[in-house]
Image (spheres, grey):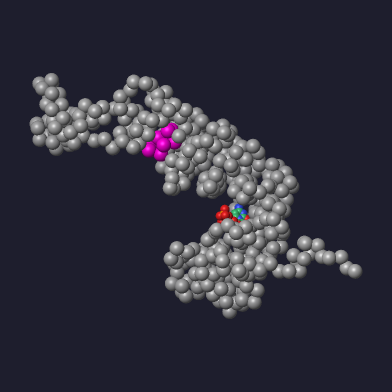
Amino acid sequence: MKPPPTYAIMREMIETNLASKLKDGLPAELVGFMQTAGELAAGRGQSLYLVGGMVRDLLLGKPNLDLDLVVEGDAVELARELAGLKAARITTHPRFRTAKLTWASFSVDFTSARSESYARPGALPTVEPGSLESDLFRRDFTINAMAVSLDASRYGALIDHYGGQSDLEQRLIRVLHERSFVDDATRIWRGLRYEQRLDFHLEEATLNWLKRDIPRLDTISGDRLRYELECVFREAQPEKTLCRADELGVLTKLHPALAADGWLVDRFRLARRLSLPHPPSFALYLALLAYRLSGEECGELTSSLKLSKPVARIVRDTATLKAKIKTLSYPEIKPSYVYRLLHGLSPSAIVAGSIATASPVARQRMESYLHKLRYVKPALNGSDLIGVGITPGPRVKELLERLREARLNGKAVSRQDEEVLLKEWLSETT
Ligand code: CTP
């Protein structure tokens, strides 16, 4: 008698079909779109596949609406035909043979199947037309290197040349080959991100190659590293990836003084609570990550990550604010002094400071500035002052500032109070 087939062999015999998962997991509009796209592609003698993260998430039963379609053939022409049919907006990159369609709240990426080679480690790849198999082989991890056929004859069939489904079941992050991190060291960050997001493990050889190739992060441009950090901060719990990155010596590749520890975990959690119902911004997370750096180190991080001017300002202001925390925690300071200390600093930096500080008094003052003090204005304005005979110029500005201080310190609560004070001040000077 023949032995019963093992599970692995049985899996090869029974093709996994995801048609019902597609139907149950996606809006009908997208399912209909994929079917139409598959038929149109077939009419052009092309094959069309759903690839990447969406396939992974379908198998995991996690929501994902990012459709990535790969065409064996020219994706741009197919996308154009579909754009006409759906009255969708289309953007194309003929040089890369890619296109993006957007309509209603949907967006779909089209790529022509391609193979990639790397001129030097860390460089962007040289791209050539290829088969689905070579397209999947150029990808980062087995769990991201699966496809689903959208051809009518095989609609929903899972194509899994590299063992992605089995790795999903074993909760493993595995590269497809030994040089994966050499080709593209940003995959180091991606690997940590998936590991922590999905609560998986880096497979043993993958972990060893990852550790071996950490120095290659030095070959990655600031723009690409910043993008990876943006992706980390978009995770539900970015601190998990940062702690893992710290443990493996990846975080210090961004800056040697960075650390992800219990302090950071608590700050990130608090940032999320305070930002509800939205997630914290990239700048807020970054300001917290950079909080314990010196001003000079913040400057180094800002330039190495090529931060935009507004984000760089928030990081810089957070460092400036840190130097004022001691003063902000003195027991007897007036609201007008709090205003003067904080005025001109970016509100996001003050939010970061209020989350980061260990002083409850300083925190309470920063919150009071953010919610109240910064909006305090005198009822009288420049024209009112000129109307009572003050010569236009710096004197007007100075008196308006004094009126604001009076308001801040509770010395004036109405327009009438301000008029009385103004009279007093003017009589003192005459
Ligand atoms: N990819 C890759 N190497 C990279 C970036 C992307 O191989 N450095 C491939 C992976 O197959 C990935 C796909 O391109 O699945 C799409 O990339 P991206 O949108 O960044 O990833 P998703 O898998 O969609 O993951 P996420 O859930 O984080 O969006």
Residue at the location (60% across, 59% down)?
61
From which residue to which does the magenta span run?
Answer: 345-354
Q: How many marks?
A: 0
Is 134 in front, or is 143? 143
Residue 380 % position (x, y): 17, 35
Q: Main secondary structure of the magenta part?
A: helix
Identify the image quadrant of the C terminus.
top left
Q: Is residue 375 visible?
A: yes
Q: Is residue 121 left or right of residue 89?
A: right
Q: Is residue 191 above or below residue 39?
A: above
Residue 55, picture quadrant: bottom right
Q: Is residue 250 left or right of residue 91?
A: right
Residue 353: in magenta span: yes
Residue at the location (47% across, 28% down)?
358
Residue at the location (41% across, 42% down)?
310
Residue 155: in magenta span: no
Residue 153 % position (x, y): 64, 77
Is 289 in front, or is 93? 289
Name of the residue lying farthest toward the bottom? 43
Identify the image quadrant of the N terminus.
bottom right
Residue 20 % position (x, y): 60, 69
Residue at the location (69% across, 55% down)?
169
Residue 418 % position (x, y): 16, 30
Q: Is residue 255 visible?
A: no
Q: Within the displayed image, which quadrant is ligand 1 positioned in?
A: bottom right
Is 114 in front, or is 416? 416
